[in-house]
Amino acid sequence: MESHPTRKIKLSEARSTFSALVNSIYRNRERVIVEKSGIPVAAIIPIDDLERIEQMDDERASRSAVLERYSWLFDAYTADELEAQVARTVAESREDFTAEATKR
């Protein structure tokens, strides 16, 4: 993924140069953090960055919906039991991966 330059500007500068600022963001694919009294309050980003963020949000919401739909399956277990099972599963997966890698 391509890295975009990021710069910080004061709100007063953003306000007085908004049209040029938007043109620069579009042309140079940069990201701008707008600060008010030295505190970051907003960001102006290229539209494709926003589209990627929205896509990630949609994917996250979809995964959350699936997890929510099946969460009742884990109601009978404590958090410690679930964590222990996850640790066992990870360890088994690592063992399987290592065994498979040594076969090659």
Image: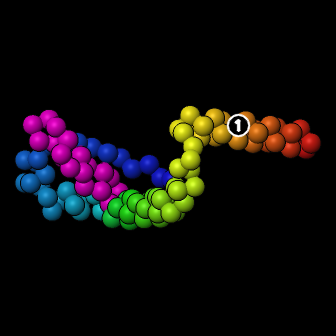
Q: Position of residue 28 (x, y in %)?
A: 33, 56
Residue 35 is left or right of residue 91, and the answer is left
Number of numbered discs visible in the structure rendering: 1
* Amino acid carrying mark 1 in the image: Arg
Residue 89 is left or right of residue 76, and the answer is right
| Among the 4 quarters of the image, the one containing residue 97 | top right
Q: Position of residue 100 (x, y in %)?
A: 86, 44
Q: Which residue is mark 1?
A: 88
Q: Nearer the viewer, residue 100 or 14?
A: 100
Q: Main secondary structure of the magenta part?
A: strand
Name above or below for residue 19 compared with residue 38. below
Residue 63 visible from this viewpoint:
no
- Identity of the residue drawn at 15% across and 62% down: 19
The span picked out in magenta is: 27-46
Q: Is residue 44 magenta?
A: yes
**In the picture, which quadrant includes the C terminus?**
top right
Disc 1 crowd, CA 10 A, few/some/many (<14, 14-19, 20+): few
Q: Position of residue 89 (x, y in %)?
A: 70, 41
Residue 24 visible from this viewpoint:
yes
- Identity of the residue drawn at 27% across and 43% down: 7
| Among the 4 quarters of the image, the one containing residue 40 | top left
- Identity of the residue drawn at 53% across and 38% down: 79
Name above or below for residue 44 compared with residue 54. above
User: Residue lying furthest front in this view?
Assistant: 76
- Determine whether the residue tagged by mark 1 lies in a helix, strand or loop: helix
- Identity of the residue drawn at 92% across and 42% down: 103
Residue 9 is left or right of residue 27, and the answer is left
User: Residue lying furthest right in this view?
Assistant: 103
Q: Nearer the viewer, residue 47 or 4?
A: 47
